[in-house]
Structure formats: structure tokens, C-alpha cells
Amino acid sequence: MPSMISGGRRWQTIELEVERSIARLRFNRPDSRNGVVSAMLVEVYEALRLVAGCPEIDVLAWTMRLAAQAARIRGAGQAEQPAQQRPLA
């Protein structure tokens, strides 16, 4: 099970979790297409300092939450609607 490391801080624009020796740093502003703002840069810097201070972490995976993922998370527990098909051409 992943553990969240935050140094006692609640992140507003990122997520940071560690599972075994892998840290996952995820941009978490899907509604703005993960556009980087100054608050995010500050949080990324703080998160990287935390990761650098954890000798048990060997790998850092840097990802971003997409709008579709956020919608699924917000709608957890609700019936998923089938996707509408469109012609490719």
C-alpha cells in the first residue's frame, strides 16, 4: 500500500506517495491541464527535498493526473456511463 509523505504538509497542486522504494510525484491540476503555476513550483521543490532526504527511495516517477482520471475519481461509486462512439473520419 502506498504511503503519502508530506513532511506534515497538505499539498494543493501535487501528490507525493511512496511505495517500497519508488516515489511518485504527480501534478494534480487536471482541470487546468496541469498548467504550472508558482505555487506548484514551490510544492515540487519541497517534495523533491523530501524525496532527496529519504535514503530508502531509489526511484522517482514524475507523472500527472489527467482530467479523465480526475472525473473517474470524483465519480467513484457512481455508475460509469458508456462512451459515445464517433466516426474516425
Image (spheres, rainbow, N blue to C red):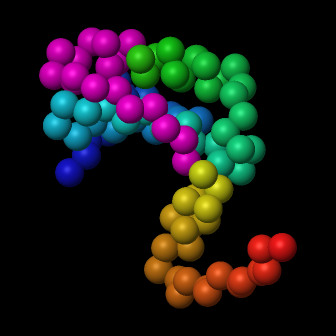
* Left or right of residue 57: residue 5: right
**Residue 43 drawn at (x, y percent):** 53, 23
| Quadrant (top left/top right/bottom left/bottom right) for the C terminus | bottom right
**Residue 51 drawn at (x, y percent):** 32, 19
User: Going 26% across and 33% down the picture, which residue do you hit?
Assistant: 22
Query: Relative to the observer, which residue lies in front, 21 or 15?
Result: 21
* Furthest-right residue in this view: 89
User: Going 17% across and 37% down the picture, which residue do you hit?
Assistant: 20
**Residue 63 drawn at (x, y percent):** 49, 38
* Left or right of residue 50: residue 83: right
Q: Is residue 58 above or below residue 27?
A: above
User: Going 70% across and 20% down the picture, which residue do you hit?
Assistant: 38
| Residue numbers of the magenta segment | 49-65
* Furthest-front residue in this view: 89
Task: Evaluate whether residue 21 shows in this view.
Answer: yes
Quadrant housing residue 6: top left
Q: Is residue 47 above or below residue 35?
A: above
Residue 54 falls inside the magenta stretch: yes
Q: Is residue 31 above or below residue 89?
A: above
Quadrant housing residue 68: bottom right
Query: Relative to the observer, which residue lies in front, 81 or 39?
Result: 81
Task: Evaluate whether residue 5 shows in this view.
Answer: no
* Left or right of residue 13: residue 57: left
Residue 24 falls inside the magenta stretch: no
* Left or right of residue 82: residue 20: left
Counting every numbered tag in the picture gives 0
Query: Relative to the observer, which residue lies in front, 8 or 22?
Result: 22
Q: Is residue 16 above or below residue 65?
A: above
**Residue 65 drawn at (x, y percent):** 55, 48
